[in-house]
Image: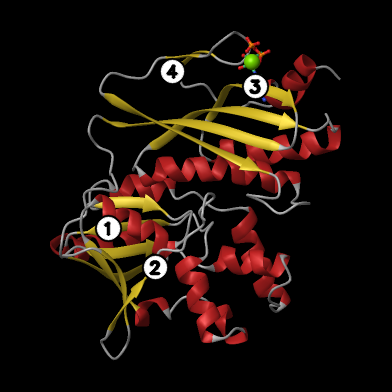
Amino acid sequence: MDEFSLIKKYFADLNSTPIDGSVKLGIGDDAAIIRPANGEDLLITTDTLINAVHFPDKTPPRAIAYKSLAVNLSDIAAMAGTARWFTLALSLPEPDQNWLKEFSAGLFELANMFHVQLVGGDTTRGPLSITISVIGTVSKGGSVRRSTAQVGDRIFITGEPGLAKLGLSTVNKEIELPEKEKMRCLDKLNYPQPRLQEGVFLRDYASSMIDVSDGLAADLAHIADASACSAVLLAQALAEFNPESHSLTANMAIDAVLYGGDDYELLFTVPTDKCEEMEQAWSAAFSNLSCIGEITAGKGVFLQERAGELRKITAAGYNHFHV
Ligand code: ADP
Ligand code: MG
């Protein structure tokens, strides 16, 4: 199968998200033509996933595709934007038809769920790697940055941070979990749910926002550093996560919450006078939201133990060039 029939069969022909008029030209020419509406800011993000670095060897192709798109959608969510279009640069060791079929099924499953349209890409032979770029929109000036947290703001996180890390630890045979819990953690690892609707909702409330890819401690440090503030996490609030923890030591459970990457939850801050309204409106629309701490004056991220003492936490999130 040549490159062009491969692109047609697995990508162009399966690209069924209805066109909303913004795509003047999609796959097939030298570049796509997109016409955003007046008054929209564009949000542009790229992430590469490499075999055995970002996903374990032998990850099902459906999960590889799903996750490659999900991590990019999560970045758009963290800016409070709407994901609209994406490109896919795929490097493949060989054109394995079964692999491609499952890969494109996983890709379009998620793309259709969030109405984001594939508008182009590149297909090459080489070690397995997937680069996706997503373009999103947000009303002019309406996006939420990581650099605008204020002293006194409360810190919130969606979902259950730490589960993806537990999933990875079971794959690597570092821990064992009961079957049902293991499946739940693997699902979080392989099929992260981008919090796009939540991100748009938070436009009216969040003073700053980031998605958790490197780990809660590391990504909170990004908010704190960019906002020139400090952040204090409450150990008691973090202990609420991970019902799986009964089969782990307390330290392993808290480590998964603080340092486990790949959660793709939204981590954000809200001014205290907006918290009550936000939490009420949140529970009418979504579930799983936790207040886990507060932004304070100073520098760095701290954990406040139950007894009250503060412990500085080093932000040891995943870092590709760590020495
Ligand atoms: P060019 O040589 O002009 O860069 P290509 O031969 O790389 O064009 O690609 C032909 C068309 O197919 C382009 O419109 C490109 O965007 C699209 N395309 C290539 N690979 C993919 C892919 N994996 N997914 C979606 N579209 C793709
Ligand atoms: Mg090309």
Question: Which quarter of the rendered image does ligand 1 occupy?
Answer: top right
Looking at the image, the residue that sits furthest to the top is 29
Query: Which circle, 3 or 4, is nearer the viewer?
Result: 3
| Disc 3 to disc 4, C-alpha distance | 22 Å
Q: Quadrant of residue 314?
A: bottom left
> What residue do we see at 40% from left, 44% from top?
77
What residue lies at 41% left-to-right and 60% top-to-bottom? 218
**Element type at marker 1?**
helix
Front one among 236 and 280: 236
Q: Residues within 10 Å of mark 3 (few under 14, many from 20)?
A: few
* Left or right for 28, reference 97: left
Is residue 31 visible to the viewer in this orientation of the structure?
yes
Instruction: From the image, tell me which residue sits under label 3.
Output: 122
Residue underneath mark 1: 224
Mark found first going from the N terminus, 3 or 2: 3
Instruction: Sort mark 1 into few (<14), some (14-19) or many (20+) by Cα contacts within 10 Å.
Output: many
Q: Is residue 316 left or right of residue 92?
A: left
Q: Which residue in the rendered view is the most extreme toward the bottom?
A: 307
How far apart are the alpha carbons under marks 2 and 4?
Answer: 45 Å
Q: Secondary structure at mark 2?
A: loop
Residues marked 3 and 1 touching at CB (< 8 Å): no
The reply, left or right, for residue 266 in relation to residue 229 is right
Mark sitting earlier along the chain (2/1):
1
Say what amino acid the circle numbered 2 marks.
Thr
Question: Is 166 located above or below residue 281 in the figure?
Answer: below
Badge 1 or badge 4: first in the primary sequence: 4
Disc number for residue 22: 4
